[in-house]
Image (spheres, rainbow, N blue to C red):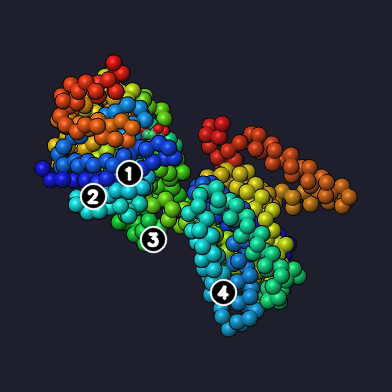
Amino acid sequence: MTEILRVEGLQKRFGGIVVSDNIHLTIGAGEILGLIGPNGAGKTSLFNLISGVLRPDAGSIFLNGQKIDGAPLYKRARMGIARTWQNMLLFRTMTVLDNMLVGPRDYAGESVTRLAFGRAGVRAAEAAMRARAMGILGRMGLESTASSMVVDLPFGQQKLIGLARTLMNDGPLLLLDEPMAGVEGAAYETMQRVVRQEAASGRAVCVVEHNVSFIRDLCSRAVFMANGKILQDGTVEDLIASATLTELYFGV
Amino acid sequence: MDYLITLAILIAIYVILGASYNLVIGYGGLSTVAHPIFFAIGAYTTGLLSVNVPELPAVVNVLLGMVTAVVASVLLAGSALRVSGDYLLIASLGFQLGLLQLIKNLDFTGGPGGLSAIPSTILGAARGPAFLAITGAAAVACVFIIRAIVNGPYGRAISAMRDEELAFTALGRNAMSMKIAIFAIGCGMAGGAGGIYAYYFQYISPDQFEVLASATILTMVVLGGMGTPFGPVVGAILLLAIPQAITFLQLPPAIMAPTQGIIFTVLVLVFLYLRPAGILGNKARAI
Ligand SMILES: Nc1ncnc2c1ncn2[C@@H]1O[C@H](COP(=O)(O)OP(=O)(O)OP(=O)(O)O)[C@@H](O)[C@H]1O
Ligand SMILES: [Mg+2]
């Protein structure tokens, strides 16, 4: 399996709280890695470190073998790290389609010089991006929401749109932060199907999720985190079977 | 007639100031009170060049005024935004007050007495109408350039940035350079307005560029409709024309001044009460 992401000795603390304590992790192309652990374990912080929202105190991150430690958040997105957010962070004053159109990694339309000198090129790029956005919305059964304001939609659909917008970034790494929280019914099925399809297309996917059955259905491998440490890295079955982890996480 | 032309030119200048301030604060969400000083940078650069380097054509002087404003704005926003968005407000206040103080205290700018004897450039009876045409065209160009910026893909990116800067950045967009670009475009337009202003009035002084002028410009923007392309146009016309219209009532001066103030304040309050998002603003969104 081709390695997409490698994290080496990642260290991060906020005052007295250690959110990443010597984290080592790899994710391969086509793999769906589950990341579970109690509240405050440092899961979101790890995503923040990988995507560039946070700077680590020590350690390195490699994407496709290339060290990306120095790259800021927006450059890592362009390199192909796509992520969702636990609280979605949708663009609230904009329609679903407009939310999607801010998603592509590099989009020539958004430049002042292009605006002045390349109107025709901008129109062509715009049409292509619209088609791609509608394609992704279509895959999730969301075409009909394209011109709705995101805030007018039910929560489950907003979650899906958060993922759809992220999928406009077609890079090799996909980080999903609690995609299933508050999602049920049809949206649940859709979420599962889409995540599978993305991995099948060769992307490396990492899912943070408290819903263990979602992880069990989707992942062959999972990592358990607590207090900023990775306590176990193995098959989902082993993880669930582990007495210590069960105690820590499921609070038995 | 001359008087009306001067009023119309002043309105066009304030349309540029209002529209560009609207781009920066209304669309870009960047808080600044330094707009008058960028207006001044354009006016003084153009004025000083016209006085000291008479061989340079007026167009070049105005353009150099714009360029100077753009460079200054990039330096200001580039350093302040690195700290934080709120810091820009404080830094812009410092820049506004500090630079104006400097202008007041330097000899070559004319000090507090101002810079006079700026050449007329256009002579004869056609001077007024010609300046009106130039200023009007510049104002129309600014309003439509801003409309093109905020309506296309670039505008979509601007509003995404305003909504959720973190998500915007994590989608591969450089919010910092976008903010600096918006700030520079807005301030450059203010600088250009300053250049035209200097040439038309042939006299500029520091008190025309005090920090309070940003309150006047802001009132125009808010009254017309912040975050709408044509709001500042309506705002500038109303704010400048209404006091003048009241003059036509030919009241005795003792009554005139307070009446003007009262009628004006009442009108602004009535408008803001009826249309809290501005006259052209979206009524529903404001509440
Ligand atoms: N920017 C920050 N500054 C200070 N403390 C932070 C910051 N971000 C996270 N923390 C703290 O770090 C710890 C780990 O937070 P994190 O969000 O990574 O946990 P999590 O595993 O995602 O939890 P949850 O399951 O609740 O989402 C928490 O105690 C949190 O309060
Ligand atoms: Mg979290």
**Depth order, front residue of B165/A144:** B165
Instruction: Give the residue pinned by disc 3.
Output: A113
User: In the image, which is nearer the foreground, mark 3 or mark 1?
Assistant: 1
Disc 1 is placed on an element classified as: strand
Chain at tag 2: A
> Residue B85 placed where, x, y %?
51, 48
The crowding category of the residue bearing disc 3, from other C-alpha atoms within 10 Å (few below 14, some 14 to 19, many at least 20), is few
User: For the residue labelled by badge 2, is the local secondary structure a helix, a strand or a loop?
Assistant: strand
Q: Same subunit under labels 4 and 2?
A: no
Instruction: Tell if the residue under mark 3 belongs to the same chain as the one under mark 2.
Output: yes
Which label lies toward us, 4 or 2? Answer: 2
Q: In the image, which disc is placed on residue A62?
A: 2
Same chain for the residues under marks 3 and 1 in the image = yes
Q: Earlier in the sequence, mark 3 or mark 1?
A: 1
Q: Residues within 10 Å of mark 1 (few under 14, many from 20)?
A: many
Subunit bearing disc 3:
A
User: Is A34 placed above or below A202 here?
Assistant: above
Instruction: Tell me if I can see residue A68 in this picture.
Output: yes
Whether tag 4 and tag 2 are in contact, CB under 8 A, the answer is no
